[in-house]
């Protein structure tokens, strides 16, 4: 009929310690994942900004030198593809430009 009750809580210290360890590991995992994702997003936006800046420079150069619309479209598509794949073969575009521009 009598139930033994542990009133001083001495046997539960390991449970509290385990809970604290689990919370600490969970927090560190969360911080690692969030910081990694944040850094990836920041790098993506920086690359996108660089891409837009470089493409804008190409477009302004072509407009400033009064390149025909068709050639401007070809050059813009070429540089856009090159910037997206990190490879630009300038000689391909330069062969279509008039001699005084290349």
Image (cartoon, grey):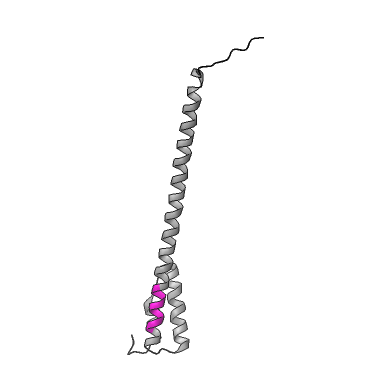
- Residue 59 or 17: which is nearer the viewer? 17
Horizontally, residue 39 falls left or right of residue 100, namely right
At x 37% / y 83%, what residue is drawn?
61
At x 46% / y 48%, what residue is drawn?
33
Count of marks overlaid on the render: 0
At x 46% / y 82%, what residue is drawn?
74
Residue at the limit of the structure toward the front, as seen here: 7
65 vs 46: above or below: below
At x 46% / y 42%, what residue is drawn?
29
- Residue 96 or 67: which is nearer the viewer? 67
Overall secondary structure of the magenta stretch? Answer: helix
Can you give x and y, in whole percent of width and height, for residue 13 in the image? 48, 23
Query: What's drawn in magenta, residue-wise?
Result: 53-61
Does residue 55 belong to the magenta stretch? yes
- Residue 54 or 3: which is nearer the viewer? 3
In what quadrant of the picture does the N terminus appear?
top right
**Residue 95 appearing in the image:** no
Can you give x and y, in whole percent of width and height, for residue 27 in the image? 46, 41
Does residue 3 belong to the magenta stretch? no
- Residue 58 or 25: which is nearer the viewer? 25
Can you give x and y, in whole percent of width and height, for residue 4 in the image? 59, 12
């Amino acid at each position: 009929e009598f139930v033994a009750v542990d009133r001083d809580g001495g046997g539960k210290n390991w449970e509290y310690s385990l809970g604290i360890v689990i919370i600490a590991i969970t927090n560190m995992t969360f911080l690692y994942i969030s910081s990694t994702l944040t850094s990836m997003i920041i790098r993506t936006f920086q690359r996108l900004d660089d891409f837009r800046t470089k493409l804008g420079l190409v477009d302004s150069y072509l407009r400033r030198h009064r390149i025909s619309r068709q050639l401007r479209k070809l050059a813009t598509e070429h540089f856009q593809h090159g910037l997206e794949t990190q490879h630009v073969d300038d000689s391909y575009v330069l062969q279509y430009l008039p001699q005084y521009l290349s």
